[in-house]
């Protein structure tokens, strides 16, 4: 049930992103959303979804003791704990990707053995002309997306990468079978067409301790 509510929250969060981007134009349209905007907005949406299901968890932001670049949020009840890591891929380079994996590994050391744990990753990225940028969908999903032609029509030639996030999740924290998704919440004001140059990335992992 909890994973279903998280999925519903992500679907609704896409509408929130559209509003956030409109409110913060042109900054968001040039560089994407900062981690704190991204993470807190998704957590607020999840808290609302849980409350509508008569679940009232506690929402906190985890203190950044290790100077990690990504904010970490915690939504906790007696039955479950959702760990939320927000990551802004302003750059798509290897160092930025590794920073996310490092944060995930750090969070995994604090999973609550007394509840069922869920790990939720959220990131965003504006495509640029670099090779690293064009690899982001493949890196996140573990393969190229099926709608690769949609990107091509928007001038984005996606590239494969052998080093993927699902593989890193398995090797570093022994998490598998995550629901990895790419979303495109923005629409062109002129044509109302999907803006493929902006991607919102989400992943849901059910943790088995």
Image (cartoon, helix red, strand yellow):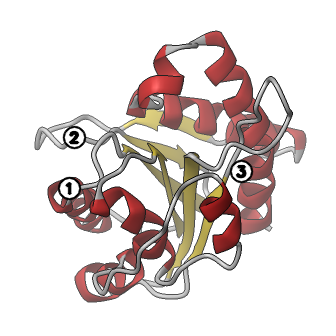
| Residues packed near mark 2 inside 10 Å, few (<14), some (14 to 19) or many (20 plus) | some
The answer to whether residue 107 is visible is no
Gap between marks 1 and 3, in whole Å? 23 Å
| Residues packed near mark 3 inside 10 Å, few (<14), some (14 to 19) or many (20 plus) | many
Residue drawn where x is 47% and y is 16% of the image: 27
Relative to 112, is 70 on the left or the right?
left
Of the image marks 2 and 1, the number of the one nearer the N terminus: 2
Look at the numbered disc 3 and give the secondary structure of its residue. Answer: helix
Gap between marks 3 and 2, in whole Å? 23 Å
- Residue wearing tag 1: 99
| Residues packed near mark 1 inside 10 Å, few (<14), some (14 to 19) or many (20 plus) | some
Q: How many marks?
A: 3
Residue drawn where x is 15% and y is 57% of the image: 95
Towards the viewer: 187 or 83: 187
Residue drawn where x is 46% and y is 31% of the image: 32
* Marks 3 & 2, CB-CB < 8 Å contact: no
Relative to 98, is 159 on the left or the right?
right
- Residue wearing tag 2: 69
Image position, residue 110 (x, y; %): 30, 61
Image position, residue 96 (x, y; %): 22, 53
* Marks 1 & 3, CB-CB < 8 Å contact: no
Towards the viewer: 13 or 130: 130
Image position, residue 35 (x, y; %): 40, 34
- Residue wearing tag 3: 10
């Amino acid at each position: 049930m909890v994973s279903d509510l998280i999925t519903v929250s992500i679907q609704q969060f896409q509408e929130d992103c559209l509003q956030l981007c409109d409110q913060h134009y042109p900054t968001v349209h040039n560089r994407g959303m900062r981690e704190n905007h991204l993470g807190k907005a998704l957590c607020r949406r999840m808290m609302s979804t849980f409350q509508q299901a008569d679940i009232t968890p506690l929402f906190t932001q985890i203190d950044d003791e290790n100077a990690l670049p990504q904010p970490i949020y915690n939504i906790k009840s007696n039955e479950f704990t959702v760990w939320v890591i927000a990551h802004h891929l302003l750059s798509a380079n290897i160092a930025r990707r590794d920073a996310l994996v490092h944060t995930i590994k750090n969070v995994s050391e604090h999973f609550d053995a007394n509840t069922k744990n869920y790990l939720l990753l959220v990131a965003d990225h504006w495509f640029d002309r670099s090779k690293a940028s064009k690899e982001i969908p493949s890196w996140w999903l573990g393969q190229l997306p099926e709608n690769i032609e949609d990107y091509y029509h928007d001038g984005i030639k996606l590239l494969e990468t052998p080093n993927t996030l699902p593989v890193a999740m398995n090797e570093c924290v022994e998490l598998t079978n995550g629901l990895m998704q790419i979303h495109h919440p923005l629409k062109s004001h002129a044509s109302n067409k999907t803006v493929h140059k902006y991607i919102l990335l989400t992943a849901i992992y059910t943790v088995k301790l």
